[in-house]
Image (cartoon, helix red, strand yellow):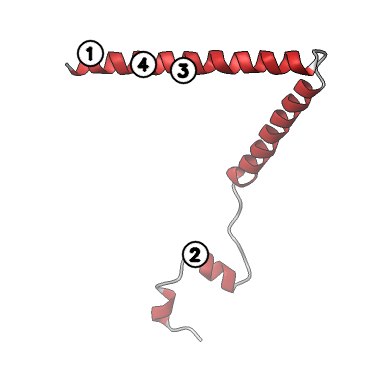
């Protein structure tokens, strides 16, 4: 069985497990998985919406490709601008 010195090494969850109990679940234990599933549903819905959009596939792909390029260009410009500003501050 267990000695008193063994009990010093036990955590709260170990003792509760020996008794057949568990800690009470908080709001984050159910909220985070729910938000994750909700986010995946939103992404899948947006993807399906794009797939059944009224535009022809080639035109839709071209529009998406152009938007991605614009986003990449904006990100590259913002990155280079922040590097320039950081270099100016350090001098």
Q: 15 or 36, which is in the foreground? A: 36
Q: Quadrant of the C terminus?
A: top left
Cα–Cα gap, marks 1 and 2: 54 Å
Q: How many other residues sit within 10 Å of disc 4, few (<14), some (14-19) or many (≥20)?
A: few
Residue 91 is left or right of residue 59, and the answer is: left
> Which comes before the other along the chain, label 4 or label 3?
3
Q: Which residue is labeled 3 in the image?
A: 75
Residue 35 % position (x, y): 65, 36
Q: Is residue 38 above or below residue 70?
A: below
Q: Are marks 2 and 3 in contact (CB under 8 Å)?
A: no
Q: How many other residues sit within 10 Å of disc 1, few (<14), some (14-19) or many (≥20)?
A: few
Quarter residue 9 falls in: bottom left
Q: Is residue 49 above or below residue 70?
A: below
Q: 55 or 48, which is in the foreground? A: 55
Cα–Cα gap, marks 1 and 4: 12 Å
Q: How many other residues sit within 10 Å of disc 3, few (<14), some (14-19) or many (≥20)?
A: few
Q: Which residue is labeled 4 in the image?
A: 80
Residue 49 is left or right of residue 65, and the answer is: right
Label 4: state its secondary structure. helix
Quarter residue 70 falls in: top right
Label 1: state its secondary structure. helix
Quarter residue 19 falls in: bottom right
Q: Which residue is labeled 2 in the image?
A: 12
Cα–Cα gap, marks 3 and 1: 20 Å
> Which comes before the other along the chain, label 3 or label 1?
3
């Amino acid at each position: 069985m267990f000695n008193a010195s063994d009990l010093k090494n036990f955590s709260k969850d170990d003792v509760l497990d020996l008794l057949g109990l568990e800690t009470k679940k908080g709001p984050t234990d159910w909220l985070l998985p729910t938000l994750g599933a909700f986010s995946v549903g939103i992404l899948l819905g947006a993807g399906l919406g794009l797939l059944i959009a009224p535009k022809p596939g080639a035109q839709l792909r071209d529009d998406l490709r152009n938007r991605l390029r614009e986003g990449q260009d904006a990100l590259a410009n913002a990155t280079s601008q922040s590097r320039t500003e950081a270099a100016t501050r350090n001098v």
